Image (tube, rainbow, N blue to C red):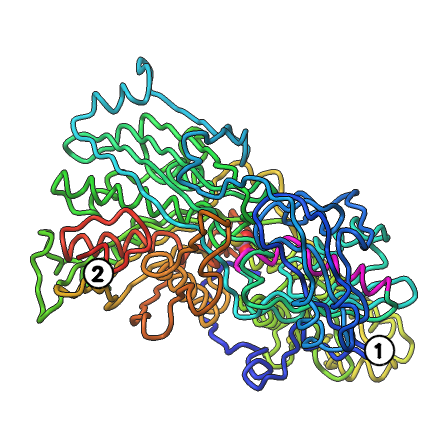
Amino acid sequence: MSGAARTVSVNRVDGRLKVTGAARYAADQPVERLAHGYLLLSTIARGTVRAMDVTAAESSPGVLAVYTPFRSLALLGSGTPFSVGHSWLPLQDAEVRYHGQAIGLVVAETFEQARDAAALVRADYEVRPAAVSFTDGIPTATDPGPFMGEPARLEFLADGVGSIDEALAASEVTVAGTYQQPGKHHSAMEPHACVAAWQDGALTLYTGTQSASLTVGTMAAALGVEAAKIRVVSPHVGGGFGNKIATWAHPLLAAAAARTLGRPVKVVLTREQTFTITGNRSAVRQTVRLGARRDGTLVAVKHQVWASQSASGGIFESSAHTTSRYLYRTENLHLDQKIVTLDVSPPTWMRAPGQESGSFALETALDELAAELRLDPVELRLRNDATVYPGRNVPWSSKHLAECYRVGAQRFGWARRNPAPGAVLRGEWLVGMGMATANYPGERFPASVNVRFRPDGDVSVSSATADLGTGMWTVLAVLGAEALGLPVARIRSDLGDSTLAANLGAFGSGATASTGPAVAVAAEAAITALITLAVTDERSPLHEVPAADVRYDRGELVTSDRRIGFPELLRTVSSPGVEATGTAGPGPEHGQHAFTSFGAHFCEVRVNRWTGEPRLSRMTTVVDGGAIINAKTARSQIVGGVIFGIGQALLEGATVEPQTGRIANGNFADYLLPVNADIPPIDVHFLDHPDLLFNPLGARGIGELGTVGVAAAIGNAVYNATGRRIRDLPITLDKLL
Ligand code: MOS
């Protein structure tokens, strides 16, 4: 395996299944005697369920059972690993922690019967006052304690500097801004769903998940069953974006109900239910203060963050520690993360958790500083490019951010930008250009892959990883083909099943970087096993040839005078196949470098001078993500990330009703997402600098990077177009009037 530049660009191997509707997602699995569950959700934000009247529901047609906190399904809630998305298990007590929490499950013969019966259940609550307003909670925000291996309040000061404020006060130029964004929802095309089927004390759970193995561990602990008795199957996932990592209420309840009823149970969340059952991104307020010299050199960065957190736990948005922490060189750095704990549904990881919001604040502040200094925003960033990871003094393994800026500026035509805000008018549109930096850490974990030579002439390459639209099916095929010297069409990839070779799954943009290197290791081991079979089986034409005299070449075993293809060999010796499992992971030397993917976004925006409507005209994104394994699916990842950022910039935001804690727009009619008409032409360019210190493929991650910085680039372009600095997302037309 070499780190040489790859130019492979192949279609998704699972593409035909997907576009013909043949791909089976969790809810599509054909299971006999299936019963259907429908979740009941709380209609208050905080309190206790005093009683639930289920009489009408129970006598409703087709109803098999109604489970509530008072007639519960036993879940244990102990053991490890345990990755439920909230701090409690459903229906094990009568507490209501937020509006839209699971308080019951109705199981019936059909989905419609379960849903209709659920509407007949009456819950009687003892209501307690709930804190649901993020803004109101800011004055009493708390320190969450250390995370990401560092304290929530992190400070580096130059010798002789007493405080960050002193450093700011002594700076020749300063800017300061407060940046806000509402909570957001993952909104995957496939809603969360599961089918739980027991047989002989063993559970098969079909559910869309980014981590079949974490789900196994969680289900085992909650159900009080050995992990070996649980299989999680998730071949296709219709989008995840982070909220298909943790396990939520529906599979726990479906599995427990299926066990009690002796029938398989399916639960498909409605779109509205996904808004409260399955996690979200924190609402965030940030203050960024920058101090610089007249030449643009940053001397002080102070980045304060307030993020919403749930009283039920969850993963809050860590905006400063993921961006200002290392993105630019500065003598004085101060980061401070606070959380506002509310009676709302738990936040969780959401595409570029931390970086998404942090880059909006930091990269907007940089633009404000550039304007103040009358310095080109690209030039300002070039002058502050960090060459070693600040405070750790380790170099990056491979960092080409400066090249991203230069190449991006060139491709985009940045030189044509008029730096004067509001100076370009085309018809009724004010036109502006903006840019911003993207960053996302290179994540890598140990992973295993199985390679199997099959008598039919194909080779299976399999691992318990996931493909949530990310292209992993295809990446396994591409890497298998490369390792074995075979056409991609002869590789059968397989994934999304916890019984396959051990793999943590797909998150942290680390699936390819972690799983990919194991393909070559497994291929090597499978070739050795194939040669061993060839020289030891007496039916083999190579029987008793010294193994050292046999080499593998593109699907054939070759000696000085013979050549035999593996399908022929396997058939000759009546072998069902030869396989081997290989594992790869980061070694101890990994700590000697910092690993980060970088990028630069450039965009052109037009703002209607009469209505304030902002529209994107075009975007260019240049990516330094190491080697690219499959250009086609890689481009899709970046385009998807950019579109995610367009949603952040212009459209998305949850509105929580202050009186009730209900998400007022928790549906696809009211929660606005980018549609085709919102998406401009997106020019994606990959720098091809393999990061061989990271892994033998030289590939870092690209799944989340594309989102980071998009909102700032758009906001900066809006400023250039109009002279209006919008620090509150989303940037809607009312803010531009
Ligand atoms: Mo990602 S937010 O780790 O799916």
The residue positioned 87% from the left and 71% from the top of the image is 544
Which stretch is magenta?
A: 241-260
Asked whether 398 or 538 is in front, the reply is 398
Q: Determine whether the residue tagged by mark 2 lies in a helix, strand or loop.
A: helix
Q: Quadrant of ligand 1?
A: bottom right
Q: Please, is residue 508 above or below residue 590 in the view? A: below
Which residue is under mark 2? Answer: 410
The residue positioned 54% from the left and 30% from the top of the image is 146
Q: Is residue 46 left or right of residue 601?
A: right
Which residue is under mark 1? Answer: 576
Q: Is residue 681 left or right of residue 635?
A: left
Task: Give percent across and percent down for residue 228.
Answer: 85, 56
Sequence-earlier tag: 2 or 1: 2
Q: Quadrant of the N terminus?
A: bottom right
Task: Give percent across and percent down for residue 20.
Answer: 57, 86
Indicate yes or no whether the magenta region holds residue 252: yes
Could you tell me if residue 480 is visible in this image? yes
**In the drawing, what numbered circle is on residue 112?**
none
Residue neighbourhood size for the residue with mark 2, other residues' Cα within 10 Å, grouped as few (<14), some (14–19), many (≥20): few
Asked whether 527 or 672 is in front, the reply is 672
- Check if mark 2's residue and mark 1's residue have beta carbons within 8 Å: no
Q: Residue furthest bottom?
A: 20
Residue neighbourhood size for the residue with mark 1, other residues' Cα within 10 Å, grouped as few (<14), some (14–19), many (≥20): few
Q: Quadrant of the C terminus?
A: bottom left
Which one is in front in this view, the residue at disc 2 or the one at disc 1? Answer: 2
- The majority secondary structure of the magenta stretch comes to helix
Q: Is residue 609 left or right of residue 214?
A: left
Q: Please, is residue 117 above or below residue 399 in the view? A: below
Asked whether 433 or 539 is in front, the reply is 433
Q: Please, is residue 632 above or below residue 231 in the view? A: below
The residue positioned 31% from the left and 31% from the top of the image is 301
Tell me which amino acid carries mark 2. Gln
